[in-house]
Image: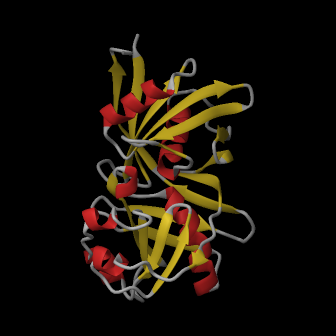
Amino acid sequence: MGQIITQVDAFTDKPFAGNPAAVCVLETPQADEWMQNIAQEMNLSETAFVVKQDDGFYLRWFTPTTEVPLCGHATLATAHVLWSEGHLSTDEAARFHTKSGLLIAQRQGDWIELDFPVTHSQAIMPPSGLSEALGVPLKSVVENYLGYLVEVESEDLVRQMQPNFPRLKTLPMADVIVTSITHPDSEYDFVSRFFAPGLGINEDPVTGAAHCCLASYWRDRLNKNQFLAYQASSRGGVVKVNYPGGDRVFLAGQAVTVLRGELISHC
């Protein structure tokens, strides 16, 4: 039998929404070039590769163009596959050894909670051309390892904006999280979108790593620890965020398997 690849929609409770990720549960480690080729073939924002170890699993994530150090939705998708396909019992935590350290996923009813490192941002002067590339006025700009984090004046601006991606790629950092508080009658605390042309993804549908940045940003501004967040891409996705302080943040989402296939060739 060839390599089984499972596609999962993450941070959603219904198919064809949230963020799709491909998951490969490997029998043995594979070469980087092979994994990058599979990720390019799948052409999703992330493809995850996981191998059993004595104390959990070794997990890596690839976009169609590069390996990334942290990915929330593909970790969520991987945990979902390990439980739903019998690699782990449903009452057992999934322990992932990654380039971002140990990550733990646990089932909480229909939700999966991820224990991730929090990301703090630093205030900066907005780079020349950022507002023009995004096509919206900027309320606040900070930066972190993921790129710029930009707050704008309203939820409507976040939802309606249409960035100039070639222009974004000319900036010192090409990847941008854009966020705003929501309307007073909204069920969500804040909305966001993540544009990542520098990673080969013009817009990522729902981004766990971005919420590792948004957690500390909004905790400082809204003076609360728990949030219900919505990433307002065309597919959309819901993330529960719990950041009590310190260096860890807890993100929760749901996941749905949408297809399963067999890779015939290992070339």
Which residue is at a point 29% across and 49% down the rendered structure image? 16
Instruction: Decide: is 34 above or below 61.
Output: above
* Residue positioned 71% across, 71% down in the render: 244
Q: How many marks?
A: 0
Give me the residue at 55% from left, 31% from top: 50
Residue 177 position in % (x across, y down): 44, 69
Seen from the viewer's position, the closer of residues 155 and 61 is 61
Percent position of residue 6, x then y: 40, 32
- Check the image and report above or below for 182 versus 12: below
Q: Is residue 181 left or right of residue 131?
A: right
In this image, 208 relative to 40: left or right?
A: right
**Split into 4 quadrants, where in the image is the N terminus?**
top left
66 horizontally vs 111: left or right: left
Question: Which quarter of the image is occupied by the C terminus?
Answer: top left
Q: Residue at x 34, y 57 (%)?
A: 197
Viewer-closest of 17 and 96: 96
The spot of residue 132 in percent (x, y) is 29, 79
Instruction: Return the x and y of residue 192 as percentages of the image width and height.
Output: 41, 71
The quadrant holding residue 99 is top right
